[in-house]
Amino acid sequence: MSENSRRDVEREQRFPCEQLEYTRTVGWLLPTILGEILTELGFVVIINPQQANGVDLEVYHESDLIFVAEVLNWSIASRLTDKRRDCIISNLNEYTCEKLLIHTVPLSNLDGFEENGTSLLQIGYQVLPRLYYDFFLTRRQVERRRMVSAATKNDIRQMIISYLTRTEFPIHH
């Protein structure tokens, strides 16, 4: 393969690895970060497997389930379909505790969440491992994307604390 052909292939590559691996890694990352933060704040957190049909996070204070969350670590190119939205609402509505949709970027099609008792928390950017972030950086595609770092985690931590304070959940920090 010539150097020009190799560059053309690299330019056309949409993801830094196979799409399924990318989706799994990125989909796992933010719930894991949120779980760590909530645990540091004194909660017990269950992070459910990605492939399971259900909520991403179950958050307990002592033995009481206080809220569940679905987490969307998406890029600005992502679109929330009606089918996916309805599935998320259905998953959240299986619980009688507080419900939260944590999403990374502005999304259209959020109709129905607040009407169904689900709070919305927008992080403001997609969180990526360094290797993935660097891939998009070379393509100048880092709008509303940040790599995992102490600063990123602290920013998310402050958003979570602000949300918990507004909703009067007990925080131990």
Image (tube, rainbow, N blue to C red):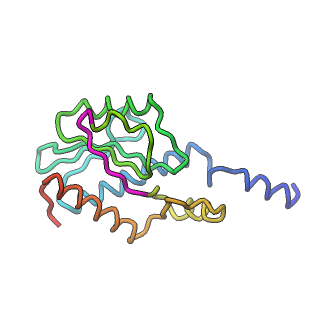
Query: Which region shows up in magenta?
Result: 115-124
Q: Relative to the observer, which residue lies in front, 62 or 109?
A: 109
Numbered marks: total: 0
User: For this view, does 62 lie left or right of residue 148?
Assistant: left
Taking 167 as reference, is 112 above or below it? above
Q: Relative to the observer, which residue lies in front, 122 or 70?
A: 122
* Residue at the right extreme, as displayed: 2
User: For this view, does 109 lie left or right of residue 94?
Assistant: right
Q: Please tell me which residue is depicted at 31% across the width and 32% down the height of the picture.
A: 91
| The stretch drawn in magenta includes residue 132 | no
Q: Please tell me which residue is depicted at 26% across the width and 44% down the height of the picture.
A: 119
Q: Position of residue 96 (x, y in %)?
A: 17, 34
Task: Name the quadrant containing residue 171.
Answer: bottom left
Q: Please tell me which residue is depicted at 33% across the width and 33% down the height of the picture.
A: 112
| The stretch drawn in magenta includes residue 118 | yes
Q: Position of residue 4 (x, y in %)?
A: 85, 59
Q: Please tell me which residue is depicted at 48% across the width and 33% down the height of the picture.
A: 81
